[in-house]
């Protein structure tokens, strides 16, 4: 009979051990990655130097959504009949005519306007939300981008998130576009901001909260965002997200009829403040209707 093969040498055992450890690490890497994502620490956001915390909401089973989150309001108590409100309904968005009961009587076919970023001559398509006149008689509009506004954060070795500067954004745009394409979204290099075209689903775990170290909101910045997708490039982890609250622009028509972004002085105009208040009241009504519908359908059980 042939003699048995000699036992493996020490270098061979070491190679086998390293190979097994490598396979085990690859298998457990996604699990370890998820654990680290739950421990996201400080972040620098929107080119501000003040530190803040990025926290993920605790996931609720069965919760999900599309595009942006909705702040949930308490549903009406069971057995209590809801009376019709005595105050009039909030003014609907521009282009819609409703009766006293909220039924749509008419809807305009053209509700899209385009504003151009003077710094790069890139357009941004927007939905016309409000049309009004300023205190000086100028025709103004409150606009919201048609596509989803997106921003990018980066993390190296999972040591927290930081904003991506303009030069770096231009270098990673192809990779960001590919990451969005993998989830059937299209990156649009628009004026004023980057946008993504298409819908996406998310859970409560994907909602981020931006806070200072003291737990306070950052003035002028969204306090909440929704993660869309992530990608890796050259040892750096990037996250594409969208602010939860809608991004609004105040535009005014110039003498030639072209829309221009309003200056800071016009933003203090009472007519502008009133238009923003109308939009806020309408959005609150939409949230209340959604909460009522969910309670009637038993989705909160």
Image (tube, grey):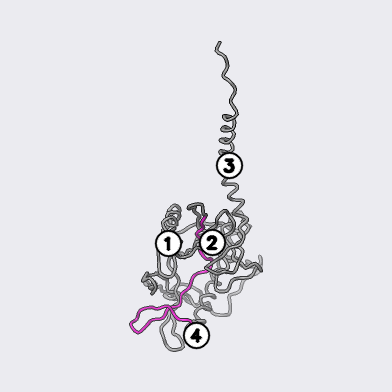
Q: Earlier in the sequence, mark 1 or mark 4?
A: 1
Q: Earlier in the sequence, mark 2 or mark 3?
A: 3
Disc 1 versus disc 2: distance between alpha carbons?
22 Å
Q: Which residue is mark 2?
A: 226
Q: Which residue is mark 3?
A: 25
Assess whether mark 2 and mark 4 are in contact (beta carbons under 8 angstroms).
no
Assess whether mark 4 and mark 3 are in contact (beta carbons under 8 angstroms).
no
Disc 1 versus disc 3: distance between alpha carbons?
33 Å
Q: Is residue 255 magenta?
A: yes
Residue 195 appears left or right of 277: left
Q: Can the viewer see residue 37?
A: yes
Q: Residue at x 52, y 68 (%)?
A: 47
Q: Which residue is mark 4?
A: 269
Residue 215's place in the image compared with 252, above or below, is above
Q: Earlier in the sequence, mark 1 or mark 3?
A: 3
Q: Residue 71: which quarter of the image?
A: bottom right
Question: Residue 139 placed where, x, y %?
Answer: 41, 83
Which element carries disc 2, helix, strand or loop?
Answer: strand
- In this rendered view, identify the residue nearer to me: 121 or 4: 4
Q: Earlier in the sequence, mark 4 or mark 2?
A: 2
Question: Residue 120 placed where, x, y %?
Answer: 38, 70
Q: Which residue is mark 1?
A: 170
Assess whether mark 3 and mark 1 are in contact (beta carbons under 8 angstroms).
no
Q: Nearer the viewer, mark 1 or mark 2?
A: 1
Assess whether mark 2 and mark 1 are in contact (beta carbons under 8 angstroms).
no
- In this rendered view, identify the residue nearer to me: 4 or 24: 4
Q: Earlier in the sequence, mark 3 or mark 4?
A: 3
Which element carries disc 4, helix, strand or loop?
Answer: loop
Q: Residue at x 55, y 12 (%)?
A: 2
Question: Residue 145 placed where, x, y %?
Answer: 44, 69
Which segment is the magenta one? 237-265
């Amino acid at each position: 009979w042939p003699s048995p093969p000699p036992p493996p040498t020490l270098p061979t055992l070491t190679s086998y051990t390293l190979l097994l450890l490598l396979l085990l690490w690859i298998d457990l890497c996604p699990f370890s990655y998820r654990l680290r994502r739950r421990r996201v620490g400080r972040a620098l956001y929107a080119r501000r130097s003040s530190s803040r915390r990025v926290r993920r909401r605790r996931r609720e089973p069965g919760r999900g959504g599309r595009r942006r989150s909705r702040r949930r309001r308490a549903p009406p108590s069971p057995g209590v009949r809801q009376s019709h409100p005595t105050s009039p309904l909030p003014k609907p968005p521009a282009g819609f005519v409703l009766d006293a009961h909220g039924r749509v009587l008419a809807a305009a076919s053209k509700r899209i306007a385009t504003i151009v970023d003077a710094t790069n001559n890139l357009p941004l398509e927007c939905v016309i939300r409000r049309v009004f006149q300023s205190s000086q008689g100028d025709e103004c509009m409150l606009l919201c981008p048609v596509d989803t506004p997106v921003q990018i954060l980066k993390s190296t070795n999972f040591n927290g998130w930081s904003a991506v500067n303009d030069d770096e954004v231009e270098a990673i745009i192809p990779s960001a576009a590919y990451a969005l394409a993998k989830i059937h979204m299209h990156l649009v290099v628009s004026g004023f901001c980057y946008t993504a075209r298409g819908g996406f689903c998310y859970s409560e775990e994907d909602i981020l909260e931006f806070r200072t170290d003291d737990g306070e909101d950052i003035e002028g910045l969204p306090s909440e965002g929704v993660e869309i997708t992530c990608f890796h490039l050259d040892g750096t982890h990037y996250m594409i997200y969208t602010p939860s609250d809608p991004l609004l622009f105040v535009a005014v028509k110039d003498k030639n009829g072209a829309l221009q972004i309003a200056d800071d002085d016009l933003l203090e105009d009472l007519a502008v403040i009133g238009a923003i208040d109308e939009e806020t009241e309408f959005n609150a009504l939409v949230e209340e209707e959604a909460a009522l519908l969910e309670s009637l359908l038993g989705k909160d059980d």
